[in-house]
Amino acid sequence: MTLHDVSLDQPLFRVEGLTKRYGQRIGCADVSFDLWPGEVLGIVGESGSGKSTLLGCLAGHMQADEGKILYRGRNTLTMPEPERRVLSRTEWAFVHQNPRDGLRMGVSAGGNVGERLMAIGARHYGDIRETAIDWLGRVEISGERIDDRPRQFSGGMQQRLQIARNLVTSPRLVFMDEPTGGLDVSVQARLLDLLRGLVRDMGLSVIIVTHDLAVTRLLADRLMVMKDGRVIEHGLTDQVLDDPQAAYTQLLVSSVLQV
Amino acid sequence: MIEIQNLSKSFTLHNQGGAVIPVMAGAHLKVAPGECVALTGQSGAGKSTLMRMIYGNYLAASGSILVGGVDVAAATPRDIIRLRREILGYVSQFLRVVPRVPSRTVVAEPLLALGMPQETAHNRAEELLSLLNIPERLWSLSPTTFSGGEQQRVNIARGFAHAYPALLLDEPTASLDARNRDVVLGLIKAAKERGAAIVGIFHDEGARERVCTREVDVTVFTPGVAA
């Protein structure tokens, strides 16, 4: 199978029996799921439920102890490291909760976007700058700000810049760790709207970790609920939220304040 | 188009002593293309529960729910997502949208999800918004700030944007004035004429009489009530 034939009839990403331990303690245990092209999977659970550990293992930031992670049929856990790094730079992207973890704060906005293009071989300065301006526009940052450093940006703008930096290489799979966390509610809404449009227009598959159930309702097709490192419920987002089966999910859903 | 057999549903409230509440048993329903079936029965009888189960929003305990050949009671989330995109529409009572998204886009979204070019989708959206008497100056605004009736009309426009072969309508004429009620009944009639199979809840008796081909009392599916 070559890297370029992606079929809509095959899952893009398949996880089987993934387990990560911290010594005696379980990080996440026996997690399995399929993700299809264009699908958004939400992972929810409270702090310590294992959702961030799971995301870290999936994205290759942490080494899992057991299981398989198949990306377009290839096991990323046994793949040579250089190959996995190429994946992370090209077909995968990772949006951190804190933009400072995903951006280079001392480099201009244009540089932040252009750097990822250069990492995959772009060399023509004019083209890179033009693509960067285009992407800044797509995430609603004025092209006039291209030479400003991210630290001169608001939190919401930094997060949008991080998204531009990640999506400029047209990845297929995007990992997101609480991308709307720490932002004002009005800024969150703008970001959600932006993400939804990009997911639809680019046909992205997304795995998004969040503790915000409202965010999952608006963004995720499917939802996995985690507790103590295990997936305790998994289904269509609105079904899990409106007709939760597990005791813990019922508690989680009923604890949300209605506005 | 829609065929329900021996459907049952109960809720288990784990955080209230594990109480099990059976809400439906032995439900049957068959809706052919071009039919509009009204679910009747008093409040709490299970009309909304049945609609939500057809849409895959509530899980069935047992039985089958065939919609366009897909058994919603057994289908994978992925199959249900596709069913909802292409075959099965749902006009709920309340609009739930991302804040800040213009009404025009809210209405066009189901079409964009089907891959329709943006301009064509927006044209269709504008057609529906004007048909439903939403003033043009509101099209570029998010419906979150609209009045209840305006939100409901945006919701209806969205639900009718794509010509779904099967449609679920939850009180589509509630909170509408006479003029807009007529428009909505016209949309339902047109959907029937093009062969859509429709299931609806209509507290508005006049509306029910005008568009529904028959009524099904869900009380007979309520455990402990049916003889």
Image (cartoon, coloured by chain):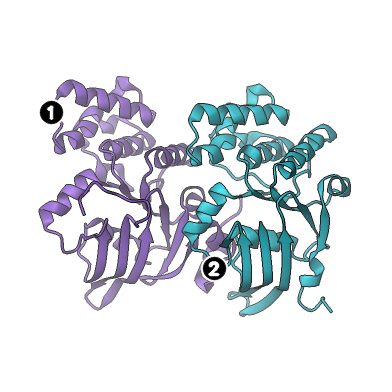
Q: Which mark is residue A62?
A: none
Left-right relation of A243 to A39: right
Residue A17 figure quarter: bottom left
Q: What amino acid is found at the position of numbered circle 2 in the picture?
A: Ala
Q: Is residue B145 above or below residue B64?
A: above
Q: Kindly report the distance in space between the C-alpha atoms of the residues bearing marks 1 and 2.
A: 52 Å
Q: What amino acid is found at the position of numbered circle 1 in the picture?
A: Arg
Q: Please identify which colour was used for chain B in the image.
A: cyan
Q: Is residue A219 above or below residue A121?
A: below
Left-right relation of A226 to B18: left
Q: Which quadrant holds the C terminus of chain B?
A: bottom right
Is residue A8 visible in the rendered structure shown here? Answer: yes
Q: How many marks?
A: 2
Q: Residues within 10 Å of mark 2 (few under 14, many from 20)?
A: some
Q: Is residue A203 above or below residue B168?
A: above
Q: Nearer the viewer, residue B147 or A206?
A: A206
Label 2: chain? B
Q: Residues within 10 Å of mark 1 (few under 14, many from 20)?
A: few
Q: Which quadrant holds the N terminus of chain B?
A: bottom right
**Residue at label 1?**
A123
Left-right relation of B119 to A54: right
Q: Which mark is residue B74?
A: 2
Residue A119 figure quarter: top left
Residue located at (30% from left, 49% from top) = A6
Q: Nearer the viewer, residue A249 or A185?
A: A249
Residue A155 figure quarter: top left
